[in-house]
Amino acid sequence: MKILYGVPGEGMGHATRSKVIIEHLIREKHQVLVLSSSRAYTFLKQSFGDCVHEIKGLHFSYKDAQISKLGTVLLNLKQAPESILHNVSRYLQLQHDFHPDLIISDFESFTFAYAKFHRLPIISIDNMQVLNRCKPTVKIPLQVKDDFLVAQAIVKAKVPFAQHYFITSFFDAVISKNSTSLVKPIIRDAIIDAKPTQGNHILMYQTSTTFKKVKEVLNQLPNERFIIYGMNTDEVDGHMQFKKFSETSFVNDLASSSAVIANGGFSFISEAVYLHKPIYSFPIKGQFEQWYNAANVERLGYGRHFETLEADHLKAFLYDVPSFKQNLSAYAQQGNIDLLNELDAILVSLRQ
């Protein structure tokens, strides 16, 4: 089949997950053309070369470690004329050079619009649809209720009326709509191949807290060793080691960690759960999906959900690490086999 695959540019999790699926589709002799933007486009272009083409996507604006709704609207309005012209050009080129049989969207809008205009079948593969196509797994408190309603409305409108929805999730949920499958998270090969061990360091990965704040908090736990990614610096300061990102180094440090600290990003939490690493999660404010991931980490006993990074919270989390490890030991996932088998079955049914 000729498959047009859409990947959003915001957040590298979409790109790393989609890479796994695209590699599988190519192995199965499908002809795949990928459309993406921003960092995801650059990442996928390095892996798949001429199969990947750039479009202009939406971008988030941040202020004080949280998403600025007004800033995001203004930023995208400013870029709208150039983005529209670029995407129209890409559309015309696509019309001339590639005639897909099917669209796969990882929460990406351009390919969805193309599918609807040309009446092509769509398969959705992402984690966000859990907010729309499953019953809530936790009680939504009043202080994040508005964020929940906004997020749910956006997810509902993003890829409606697809032929099938694959929802990737590290937690169980009750499906509430038809044509939906709940599957384990997509895990990249580097994590699948990693051999988890019990090291003496705590891995921290996040970009929403300042360098000063991180040092201030971690200095209050001098007996713990920390390896920190996301600050874009190489530095050793006593029991803290800051590292610039390298996939090999990051995977090794994650696999050998005793626990992890992060925001609420789905991909990193999924990898930590896969490797059975207890999680201290403090979501970026205003991102309900991150709040939901963190809430489910706590619900399942895989770690703790806090609003901020604080020394006292971290001490409480570390005290309970043995019980978190016990709960995580029950989590089982055989790579990506289940999702890939189900996807293949859907593709066969659509081909007939």
Image (cartoon, grey):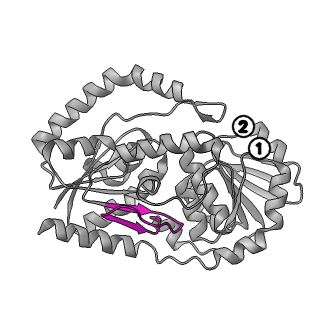
Query: Looking at the rendering, in which quadrant would you find the C terminus?
Result: bottom left
Q: Position of residue 313 (x, y in %)?
A: 81, 53
Residue at the spot x=63%, y=62% of the render? 297
Q: CA distance from mark 2 to mark 1?
A: 6 Å
Q: Viewed as shown, does residue 43 lie left or right of 230? A: left
Whether 87 is drawn above or below 128: the answer is: above
Q: Quadrant of the N terminus?
A: bottom left
Magenta extent = 165-186
Q: Which mark is residue 214?
A: 1
**Residue 97 picture location, percent across and down:** 12, 44
Amino acid at the residue labelled 1: Val
Magenta stretch contains residue 184: yes
**Relative to 96, is 123 on the left or the right?**
right
Give the labeled residue for mark 2: 210
Residue sitting at 42 percent across and 53 percent down? 132
Would you place residue 214 above or below residue 194 in this image?
A: above
Q: Nearer the viewer, residue 6 or 239?
A: 6
Is 27 left or right of 339, judged from the image as shown?
Answer: left
Mark 2 vs 1: CB contact within 8 A: yes
Query: In the rendered image, is residue 253 in sight?
Result: no
Magenta stretch, overall SS: loop
Residue 319 in percent (x, y) is at 84, 66
Circle 2: residue type: Thr
Callout 2: SS: loop
